[in-house]
Image (tube, grey):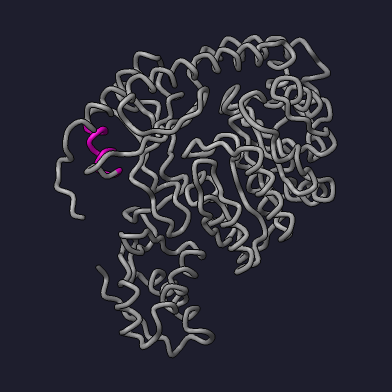
Amino acid sequence: MTFWTPELDGYPGPRYRAIAAAIADAVTDGTLPPGAKLPPHRHLADALGVTVGTVTRGYGEAERRGLVTGRVGSGTYVLGESAPRSGLTDFSIPAADADAGTIDFGLAFPVPAHREAMLADALRRLADDPLALRDTLSYQPEPGLHRHRETLATWLREDWSVALNTEELLLTVGGLHALHLSLQVLTRPGDAVAAAGLTYPGMLAAARQQQLELLPLATDDQGIVPASLAELCRQRSVRAVYCMPNQDNPTTACMGEARRQDLLGVAMHHGVTIIEDDVHLVAAGERPPNLVDMAPDHVVYITSCSKILAGGLRVGLLRAPRRLCPALADALRGHCWMAPPLNAELACRWIESGLAGELASWQRQELGARQALAAEVFADLQFRARPYGFNLWLELPEPWRAQELTEACASRGVQVKTGEPFAVGRHPAPEAVRLALSAPVSRDAVRQGLEIVRDTLAGQPATPVTL
């Protein structure tokens, strides 16, 4: 605990902003080092002679500026190496020399496959195509080559039943890049945006980096509850809402069609743009119509080739209403001028040759087998999953806590993720863990890892739990 009490007299403006400014100065001069825990709200309020609400707003402003992070039941900490923080720092890619004996359920990679031969063949064919080689070495218009966008739009329409207009598409450097572009065009620093209380850590990082106030929405087994968005919009001016309606990350929830209609109705009534993240690409027969199909003028749609083809290709797609396309092209030019045409060329060649379809079909079968395996091993546990999904959301039995389970499993060579890295602001993380079933090298490894998690839960935590 850091018993830190700032002098606010030298700071102009509202007291809550003065608190945030004092935190910033204390971080700069080292008074509050990385990992330092700020005083409880009531303690600081009493010391400063202000209300608890003022301190709460001050800490919230400091969090929006990227200075601190807070968690219900834990406290507020200065960001740094030792601070408990969320975001992409919790999802670092393992080094090449990482322990090969670890079964890593932490990252939702595509199912391991021999893609190297596919890449080598595509490169050989490209080497014999001088016109395509010229295109891959040349500057291109910001949205990307028309033929690349047309190929990707056809693939989405024919293989995934997502109908997109080529003229409304921009190629991006993966789905996260598309998210950053969307937020840059739809918002300004300080704006409020909303997402499920547990959401994709990339969204947490993007909102923090763009100095947005990310607000949590209530959820149930279908994802975001529309009434929660309506209530938030009555209280605040919300610029955008981010969601993954087909296969939520981390909870795996899928919105029903009526829920989608209700969410769209609330968003349209309040003038809120929906950012629909569909990077996991779910077959049409396993989901209702996409939000972008239901209300194209009010939805920005994001997908990519990372989960279906290969993460290293970094080929993303951003679809937006035409009125937003010029601004998005300007933003993309400012980021990287254009997405690398070589990457898009390789992805399109996989698609045109039929290899992409074969790979997607094989991965679907493998994911289905892994989910069936999990249902067998976890038959006596409570969990959520999609039949062909990448992830599984495991709700823990008493007296287990998520952090205790991750530590116990790690000691036995299995990596899982708690809900903490997915939590928006001060939204409490439930006692649950996410397992990415797609990542391990084989079904045998999946079974072994699942059995270790199950057997660990059958015992008792190593330390007593204080309730």
Position in image of residue 117 (x %, y %): 57, 9
Q: Which corner quadrant holds the C terminus?
A: bottom left
Q: Which corner quadrant holds the N terminus?
A: bottom left
Image mark count: 0
| Apparent side of residue 411 relative to residue 213 in the rendered image (left or right) | left
Residues 163 and 417: in front is 163
Position in image of residue 194 (x %, y %): 58, 56
| Apparent side of residue 456 relative to residue 125 in the rendered image (left or right) | left
Residues 196 and 83: in front is 196
Q: Is 75 drawn above or below residue 204 in the view shown?
A: below
Residues 137 and 172: in front is 172
- Is the magenta region chiefly helix, strand or loop? helix
Residues 405 and 454: in front is 454
In this view, the residue farthest toward the front is 258
Residue range corresponding to the magenta coloring: 402-411
What residue is at 47 percent from the left and 76 percent from the top?
21
As for residue 410 lying within the magenta part, the answer is yes
Q: Quadrant of residue 239?
A: bottom right
What residue is at 49 percent from the left and 52 percent from the top?
197
In this view, the residue farthest toward the bottom is 9
Position in image of residue 364 (x %, y %): 55, 17
Q: Is 35 drawn above or below residue 22 in the view shown?
A: above
As for residue 374 lying within the magenta part, the answer is no
